[in-house]
Amino acid sequence: MKSLHIRRGDTVEVLKGKDAGKRGKILKVDPVRRRVVVEGINRARKHMRPSQANPQGGVVDWELPVEVSNVMLVCPGCDRPSKVKRVRRGGKSITRVCKKCEREF
Ligand SMILES: [Zn+2]
């Protein structure tokens, strides 16, 4: 399975959709479906029926996953949404290198 260039904790900028232009932190990565969950992005609301766990019912909101192709990784070096090269530096760890400022992260 090919891993994604985006990891949990990264900051990304949204390219498409209602949250285009916003930035958020990656909360979850799903490499199989190539989707990510981004803090504060693609929020959805659902009305819940009262249940034992939540006797009042009510409105719950949370973030829906977005396609990886709709977000771009923000480089911590130059603070711009950037394409990255992935470089293997010995062992199994992969270092990402910003194509704009050459910063490794
Ligand atoms: Zn950079």
Image: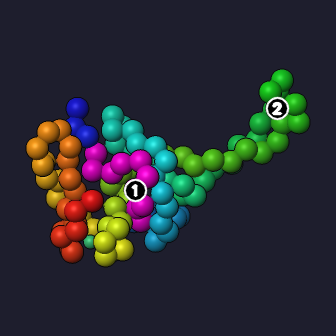
Give the magenta range. Answer: 4-13
In the rendered view, tell whether residue 46 sits above or below residue 79.
Answer: above
Q: Is 74 placed left or right of 63 in the picture?
A: left
Q: Dot 1 lies on which element?
A: loop
First of labels 1, 2 by sequence position? 1
What numbered label is drawn on residue 54? 2
- Categorize mark 1 by other alpha carbons within 10 Å: few (<14), some (14-19), many (20+): some
Q: Looking at the image, which residue sits at the far top? A: 52
Please determine whether, in this image, residue 6 is positioned above or below residue 102: above
Residue 81 drawn at (x, y percent): 33, 69
- Looking at the image, which is closer to me, 32 or 11? 11
**What is the number of callouts on the image?**
2
CA gap, disc 1 and disc 2 = 33 Å
| Ligand 1 within 8 Å, label 1 CB | no
Would you say 18 lies left or right of 105 here? Answer: right
Residue that numbered label 1 is attached to: 10
Q: Nearer the viewer, residue 90 or 86?
A: 90
At x 20% / y 53%, what residue is drawn?
A: 95
Magenta stretch, overall SS: loop
- Name the kind of residue labelled 2 in the image: Asn
Could you say which disc has been placed on residue 79 in the image? none
